[in-house]
Image (cartoon, rainbow, N blue to C red):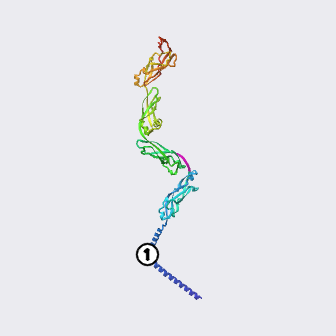
């Protein structure tokens, strides 16, 4: 039995040796086969790869691209306004997306092919709103196999502020100048006050609201609609997109009228103080340019402004507002074009020369003497009347020129001192004097003759007051 086991073991070793010999022979043949024409085999492998690539390209393989800075559209922003709040976007105004699609589609995709939104109704407690991205229904690739692999950022982050509304005046900014011979006299904007809403911080930054109008070389009135611009106190324009306007545009009416240059005159009014006269005036400017309708301009050749010198005893200077005068006396028919709105006026006031004129009783007219009475002048000498006027007139002035008179309409018989008045037509000032009189009952002699008696000894003269 031991001999059989040795024989069996011997046979196994011989079988294993045969297998190893056969394997070596196979490996040797395979090695020689691989190395045989090795260069051609490498070329064949490369060719096969290129053929595979060509086939794959013909089948439009998938690829991944990145589209950057797509604007995010806010949806349901009024949800915050209903709560009296408004958002200020800290981040997430734009988004970058990675898209996987067939190469032929991916190479043609743009940001316009996607709808990117942030729905404020989905805002979290930390004021973060998910950004949603999908292929737009209006895209020509809406039915293609396009998938959104990622987006950055995924959230729009907000800061909430109080939502407020405030009224602002709309100012007009005129650009350019009307044609020569014409002037823009008026600009009206409707509405001239409007409500602007937004975050409290944005509203507090608003300093003025402006609408611009170009009137370059305009020769007639016109109207137009224009958008609004908002500026802060430093003159920087604010973004309208962050604000809600009551109206997006306003209507402007611009009045353009012809102009005319005319003399500006000054007319003194009132009388200077007693014993003084106005010897002349000066004023600057002496002509002005006004605008108005052609019909009204045709009939105006000058403008005269009154200047009050009543009771003045020295030179008078003043600034007179020309615009106010035009509005008051011409009912707004004319508009002052000049930048200078005032006329400087100076009136020269001087003390008048004085002359004392002797007036006798024969130079005095008696007025108002009642029937049945006689009047006797009791002042024996002439009275002296002070007269003020120009030297030229005073040189030739006589008592008769003064036309002095007394009025005794209310006097009964008795002795009196009465005022002597002047009814002169000369350009002079006559001071009132006094004279003594006596009224007596009339004595009739030789029929109806009336005797006027002059006493031998008359009382002294009472000259006029200085």
The tally of labels here is: 1
Q: Quadrant of residue 426?
A: top left
Q: Quick one: quadrant of the N terminus?
A: bottom right
Q: Position of residue 431 (x, y in %)?
A: 46, 23
Q: Position of residue 57 (x, y in %)?
A: 47, 68
The stretch in magenta equals 162-168
Q: Nearer the viewer, residue 188 or 21?
A: 188
Q: Position of residue 21 (x, y in %)?
A: 50, 83
Task: Evaluate whether residue 266 shows in this view.
Answer: yes
Determine which residue is flagged by label 1: 40
- In the rendered image, the residue lying farthest to the top is 446
Whether residue 396 appears in magenta in the rendering, the answer is no
Whether residue 166 appears in magenta in the rendering, the answer is yes
Q: Nearer the viewer, residue 158 or 263?
A: 263
Which residue is located at x 52 percent, y 83 percent?
A: 19
Give the prevailing secondary structure in the magenta stretch: strand
Task: Evaluate whether residue 169 shows in this view.
Answer: no
Is the residue 405 above or below the residue 76 in the image? above
Q: Position of residue 64 (x, y in %)?
A: 49, 64
Is the residue 334 above or below the residue 435 in the image? below
Q: Quadrant of residue 3?
A: bottom right
């Amino acid at each position: 039995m031991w001999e059989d086991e040795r024989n069996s073991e011997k046979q196994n070793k011989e079988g294993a040796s045969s297998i190893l010999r056969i394997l070596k022979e196979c490996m040797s043949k395979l090695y020689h086969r691989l190395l045989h024409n090795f260069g051609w085999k490498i070329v064949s492998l490369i060719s096969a790869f290129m053929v595979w690539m060509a086939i794959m390209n013909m089948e439009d393989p998938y690829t991944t691209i990145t589209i950057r800075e797509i604007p995010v559209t806010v949806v349901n922003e009024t949800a915050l306004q209903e709560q009296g709040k408004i958002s200020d976007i800290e981040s997430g105004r734009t988004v970058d997306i990675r898209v996987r699609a067939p190469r032929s589609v991916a190479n043609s995709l743009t940001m316009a092919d996607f709808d990117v939104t942030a729905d404020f109704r989905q805002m979290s407690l930390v004021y973060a709103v998910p950004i949603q991205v999908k292929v737009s229904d209006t895209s020509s690739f809406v039915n293609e196999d396009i998938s959104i692999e990622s987006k950055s950022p995924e959230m729009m982050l907000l800061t909430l502020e109080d939502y407020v509304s405030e009224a602002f005046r709309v100012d007009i900014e005129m650009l350019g100048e009307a044609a020569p011979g014409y002037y823009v006299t008026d600009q009206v904007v409707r509405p001239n006050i409007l409500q602007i809403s937004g975050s409290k911080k944005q509203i507090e930054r608003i300093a003025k609201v402006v609408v611009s109008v170009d009137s370059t070389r305009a020769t007639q009135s016109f109207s137009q609609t224009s958008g609004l611009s908002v500026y802060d106190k430093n003159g920087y324009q604010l973004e309208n997109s962050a604000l809600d306007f009551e109206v997006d545009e306003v209507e402007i009416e611009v009045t353009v009228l012809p102009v005319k240059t005319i003399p500006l005159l000054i007319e003194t009014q009132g009388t200077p103080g007693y014993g003084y006269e106005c010897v002349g005036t000066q004023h600057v400017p002496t002509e002005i340019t006004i605008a108005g309708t052609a019909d009204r301009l045709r009939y105006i050749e000058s403008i005269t402004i009154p200047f009050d010198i009543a009771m003045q005893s020295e030179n008078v200077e003043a600034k007179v507002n020309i615009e106010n005068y035009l509005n008051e006396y011409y009912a707004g028919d004319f508009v002052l074009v000049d930048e200078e709105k005032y006329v400087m006026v100076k009136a020269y006031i001087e003390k008048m020369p004085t002359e004392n004129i002797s007036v006798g009783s024969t130079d005095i007219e008696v007025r108002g003497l009642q029937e049945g009475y006689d009047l006797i002048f009791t002042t024996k000498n002439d009275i002296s009347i002070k007269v003020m006027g120009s030297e030229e007139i005073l040189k030739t002035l006589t008592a008769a020129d003064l036309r002095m008179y007394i009025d005794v309409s209310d006097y009964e018989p008795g002795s009196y001192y009465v005022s002597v008045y002047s009814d002169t037509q000369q350009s002079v000032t006559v001071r009132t004097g006094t004279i003594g009189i006596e009224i007596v009952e009339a004595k009739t002699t030789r029929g109806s003759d009336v005797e006027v008696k002059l006493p031998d000894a008359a009382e002294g003269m009472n000259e006029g007051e200085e």
